[in-house]
Image (cartoon, rainbow, N blue to C red):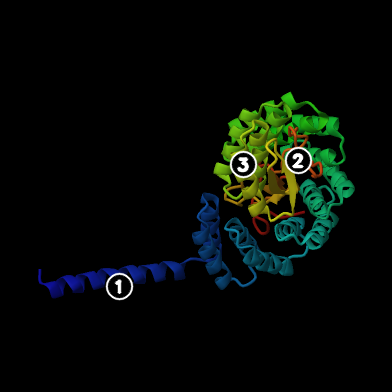
Amino acid sequence: MAERDKKLLIGLVLGLWVFLSIWDALAKTAEEFFEEGMDYLELGNYTQAITCFNNATNLSANYTEAYYNRGIAYEDISNLTQALVDYNKTISLNQTTAGYYNSRGKVYIKLSKYDSAITDCKQAITLNSSFPDAYYNRGIAYDGKNDTAKALADYSKAIFLNSTQAVYYNNRGSDYVKLSQYDKAIIDYNQTIKLSPKFSDAYYNRGIAYKDKGDTNKAITDYTKAISLNSTRSGYYNNRGNAYVKLAQYNLAIDDYTKAIKLSPKFADAYTNRGLAYYNVKDYARSSQDLDKGKELSGQAPFVLSTKGGANIQMGAINATTRQPKVVNPFSQDYKNVTREQEAKIKHIDTLEHNEVKATNTTLTNTTVAAQQLLEKPKLEVKEEVTPDNIRIIGSKQETK
């Protein structure tokens, strides 16, 4: 076959493919594009889902569910700005569905716009007073504003309405820790673990509660369990290292701080903590190196540790460092959940900051440390459980109440 004939044949095939694609697109209805988008959304193919929802809204400008689920897709790829645009459009078309306000409220939480989140959650509750996720998310927003009492009340209300959600108990436990009510916190973490045995943060948080109660051995057991479930979290190793320091098991602590640094090379507290542990085993050269690195990364004002040999090690004042974990899809870290109104499935991915902090109560031989005592704060989870009987679509196919 001549070269010219080959090119002509290829051109005809491509032209036919384009024609059939256009014909197929023109032949589809908005509803068919929507259903196709939902299939892609379930498969995690967010780009294709967005394309389908775009086609649906182009054919039907007031297609509420298409805007809403496109917002979900944008949120799943962490495009919060566009997700917010779609949720705003959704609400402009339908002001009577509690789930829409709840979803927008969670985006506001991710953007740290807590007052706006509280407003949306309140509206969701006004529309549906038995909507546990709205209370739960409002609790998260109150936590963001450091209003622990209101957050605790909302988590308790969510639990009253739905006692099967592990993360409700996890977050309430975290607030009990803030209030130094450790026994109540441990009870809530126990229930979290009962409902979700592989929830690594629940073990980690319970370890913190045990640590604060002074039961270091139980704290180590829980940190170890958390690590066995998720070995990628630098904070788990850092806090177990802190616990080993309290037991004067400095070499084990050094091993854990080293693992924390490997996972998070810019984790200033891990360098500082390892420097303190090296000091206790009289490895002053490595101690000085780590303390200098910790100071460099944290940028904190120095204070002095006096070594036996009379040299002075400059290091930063020990202060809690809040680190924000990377948000990944599906749910960040180790636990995927989906929140929903009782009559409507509302998919969302969220995470809040967790705290990985420096070792406390460290005994430094021949050392004077001008540093404040710290609390290792538990991690709050902005996550909700999936249940098999939930549905996603809100609107024509599933009428909301």
Element type at mark 2: loop
Residue beneath disc 3: 234
The outermost residue toward the left is 1
Q: Residue 219 falls in which quadrant of the image? A: top right
Could you give the CA–CA distance between mark 3 and mark 2, rounded to whole angstroms? 14 Å
Crowdedness near tag 2: few (<14), some (14–19) or many (≥20) residues, C-alpha within 10 Å: many
Residue beneath disc 1: 15
Image quadrant holding the N terminus, namely bottom left
Residue sitting at 76 percent across and 59 percent down? 101
Crowdedness near tag 3: few (<14), some (14–19) or many (≥20) residues, C-alpha within 10 Å: many
Question: N-terminal of the two: label 3 or label 2?
Answer: 3
Residue sitting at 57 percent across and 50 percent down? 329
Give the answer, above or below, for where 362 lies relative to 137.
above
Compare residues 385 and 169 and report the one nearer the observer. 169
Q: Is residue 125 left or right of residue 226?
A: right
Residue 368 seen anywhere in this rendered image of the structure: yes
Which dot marks residue 224? none
Residue 196 in the image, given as x and y percentages of width and height: 67, 33
